[in-house]
Image (spheres, grey):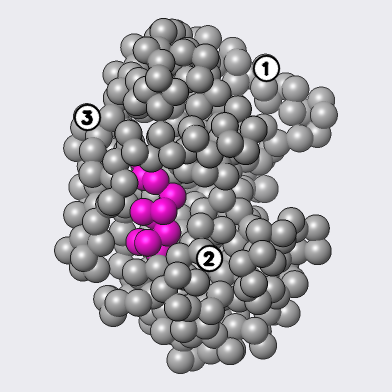
Amino acid sequence: MRVFVTGGTGFVGSHVVEHLLEAGHSPVCLVRKSSDTKHLEELGVELCEGSMSKPAALADTLAGVEAVLHIAGIIKARTYDEFFAVNGAACGELAAVAAKANPDLKRFVLVSSVAAQGPGEGNRGRSAGREPEPVSQYGKSKLAGERSVREFCGDLPLTIVRPPIVYGPRDYGMLDVFKMASYGLAPVYGKGAGYLSVVHVDDLARAIVACIEQEHPSGSVFTVDDGKAYSWLELTKAIAGAFGKRPLTLKLPPVAFKIAANLSEGYGRVVGKAMIFGRDKCLEMGQESWVCGHEEISAVLGWSPQITLEEGAAETARWYRENRWI
């Protein structure tokens, strides 16, 4: 199957491209002029130079594929308008072009986030029928993206995938957590009792590829995780264990995170740069639960996680060290 992929130069996207190739598919990766395409070139995949800011220019390419995997997005921005432009409006614009250019498209998959559905309660996943209640600007922009592509649900076989925290080789997002763990330190928000789900990037990639390989209803929404709910204390302990450490847990009061968030944003304003840690991220960290589960995708597509946190953390720690990121 010829598959159009956005975000192929990113962390999740690059792993998805690898899994597409392993499954015998032919990825066509959207890249900007400024993109670092070294990894994709080494894989020998087809590159399509263009931009999500000009989706109409992608019509000819979209007309020649059988599926679209829209993975591109941003996890940091200076304003909600910046978040919405990329994570929200651009999704619908791409879906509109795809629907018009390729009426026979077999599947359009949007990779969203559990931040779009909002937090849950305790160590159980948020109920599937509950209305989304995102608490962060990032989550609200992701939900806007979902709603913008849903407008084409009747024209495109649509699937939305909502992953929780994703980790694995080549990931910058969890790098600081692994760095702290390598020193035997585990700072946690408050008492560290909040619950969350995680998923290894290879398990997520398999789930995304499964969405284009198996028939299922248009409009399906799937969450994915590794099958367990973790407290922040359990998560940091497992990551530190990957370095052979017994972590010193630093239970920092919420006010400390709020001060750090404001300082980070202030620095970002001075240098004109979006910071990954700010009040938005702090707000997410303060929620009781980000547990999501994977029951629906298992029932519909037969997908199940294969990589435990202990196995995945050990592999990720090893990769960071071998590539001198830590």
Q: What residue is at 63 percent from the left and 32 percent from the top?
A: 325
Q: Answer above or below: position of 222 versus 1.
A: above
Q: Give the number of the mark in front: 3 or 2.
A: 2
Q: Considering only order in the chain, which callout, 1 or 3, is on the residue closer to the N terminus? A: 3
- Of the residues under marks 3 and 2, which one precedes in the sequence? 2
Tell me: residue 86, above or below residue 173: below
Residue 301 position in % (x across, y down): 24, 68
For mark 2, does the 10 Å Cα neighbourhood hold few (<14), some (14 to 19), or many (20 or more) residues?
many
Say left or right for 165 vs 177. Answer: left
Say which amino acid is labelled 2: Val
- Quickly name the residue at label 2: 17
Looking at numbered disc 3 in the image, what kind of residue is underneath it? Gly
- The answer to whether the residue labelled 3 contacts the one labelled 2, judged by CB atoms less than 8 Å apart, is no
Give the quarter of the image for residue 288.
top left
**Residue 122 versus residue 305 in the image, above or below:** above
Q: Judge whether 146 appears above or below 68 on screen.
A: above
Identity of the residue drawn at 66% across and 41% down? 77
Question: Label 1 sits on what residue type?
Answer: Leu
Residue corresponding to mark 3: 122
Judging depth in this view, the residue of 171 and 54 nearest the camera is 171
The mark closer to the camera, 2 or 1, is 2
